[in-house]
Image: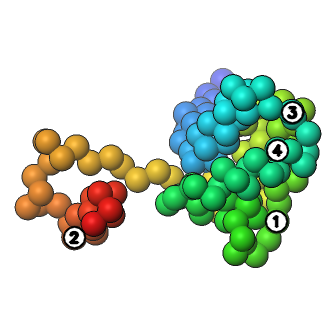
Amino acid sequence: MAVCWVFVAVLCILPGTWAAPAMCEVCREYLQRFYQSLLEKKFEFTLTAIEKELINTCRDATGNENRLCYYLGATSDAATKILSEVTRPMSAHVPVSKICERLKKIDIQICELKYDKKIDLNSADLAKLRVAELKKILDNWGE
């Protein structure tokens, strides 16, 4: 009987660990690129310097990355500002995955952001694509 309960407990735990990499996809990738750019520039890891650089980086962000910056408060039209939840741990070189986990506890919307699927135009049948997908292709082209 005890073996059965252990088996059930293991089955309940495993799916959560498999799904974990997909959570906070935009947060992890964007902040990891930001952190790597700071390391490449041999940037001074102070709170104010990181905050200014993050705000400057967010000016060029588009799509879901811009939405992430909005949630963090790094855009001019943001309603809230939780930049200190990013800059403080980043100044102490905390891993980006841990920063995103902490942000998830503050605002779940941050981890609900996902990148759009890339459409391979060579193999895709344009006649069968949805109108929304065709509009995204045109937006990417700047049309």
| Residue 23 in view (yes/no) | no
Is residue 8 toward the left or the right of residue 73 in the image? Answer: left
Q: Which numbered disc covers residue 131?
A: 2
In this figure, which residue is indicated by the disc labeled 1? 81
Measuring from the top left, give residue 139's x and y in whole percent: 33, 64
Task: Confirm whether residue 52 shows in the render.
Answer: yes
Q: Position of residue 75 (x, y in %)?
A: 70, 66
- Point out the tag, 4 or 3, that comes first from the N-terminus: 3
- Considering the image in quadrants, where does the C terminus appear? bottom left
Residue drawn 69% across the image and 25% down it: 40
- The x, y position of residue 96, in whole percent, is 72, 36
Answer few, some or many: residues within 10 Å of disc 1's Cα (few below 14, many 20 plus, some between 14 and 19). some
The Cα atoms of the two marked residues, 3 and 2, are separated by: 47 Å
**Disc number at residue 50?**
4
Of the residues shown, which amino acid type is indicated by label 1? Lys
Determine the secondary structure under disc 4. Answer: helix
| In this picture, residue 137 sits left or right of residue 9 | left
Q: CA distance from mark 4 to mark 2?
A: 40 Å
Of the two numbered discs 4 and 1 on the same chain, state the one appearing first in sequence.
4
Tell me the SS state at disc 1. Answer: loop
